[in-house]
Image: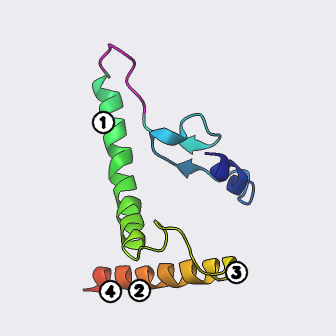
Amino acid sequence: MNLFKKQQKKFDKEQKFQGDKGYQGGERVDTPKKKKRNQKMSKEANKENQKKAQKRIFVEHVIRLIKIFGIPRERFRLKELNYEKVILTICSLVRLRIGALILA
């Protein structure tokens, strides 16, 4: 959450974000509703959470594709200056793969 707050300053003040339940309480972040302890959620809240989950599932799949390469989930052992280049290369490969999946 701290990293998100720092990065949020780079975006327009009107920019809105979507996040999972871990981002609750953040400014301009649309998150699913949590159920209160020992209470049931209303049907409307459940449907709203389901719609948010359907939008978010694509992002989760892209994160999984990036993690397949192993670099983002393990300790980076090269020089720190190379990290951004490696990550951008991985993201480019994932974008290429997604494009191939969508076109096929």
Decide if residue 74 is on the left or right side of residue 53: right
For marks 4 and 3 on the same chain, the one whose residue lies earlier in the sequence? 3
The reply to whether the magenta stretch includes residue 37 is yes
At 28% from the left and 26% from the top, the residue drawn is 43
What residue is pinned by disc 2? Answer: 96
Prevailing secondary structure of the magenta residues:
loop
- Residue range in magenta is 33-40
Task: Report crowding for label 2: few under 14, some 14 to 19, many 20 or more residues within 10 A (C-alpha).
Answer: few
- The local secondary structure at tag 3 comes to helix
Three-letter amino acid code at the position of disc 3: Leu
Quadrant where the C terminus lies?
bottom left
At 31% from the left and 22% from the top, the residue drawn is 42
Is the C-beta separation of discs 3 and 2 under 8 Å? Answer: no
Is the C-beta separation of discs 1 and 4 under 8 Å? Answer: no
Residue depth check, mark 4 versus mark 3: number of the one nearer the observer:
3
Task: Report crowding for label 4: few under 14, some 14 to 19, many 20 or more residues within 10 A (C-alpha).
Answer: few
Residue depth check, mark 2 versus mark 1: number of the one nearer the observer:
2
Q: Which numbered disc covers residue 81?
A: 3
The picture places residue 82, in percent across and down from the top left corner, at 64, 83
Three-letter amino acid code at the position of disc 1: Lys
Three-letter amino acid code at the position of disc 2: Leu
Decide if residue 41 is on the left or right side of residue 92: left
At 47% from the left and 67% from the top, the residue drawn is 74
- The local secondary structure at tag 2 comes to helix
What residue is pinned by disc 4? Answer: 100
What residue is pinned by disc 1? Answer: 47
Say if 72 sits above or below 30 in the image.
below
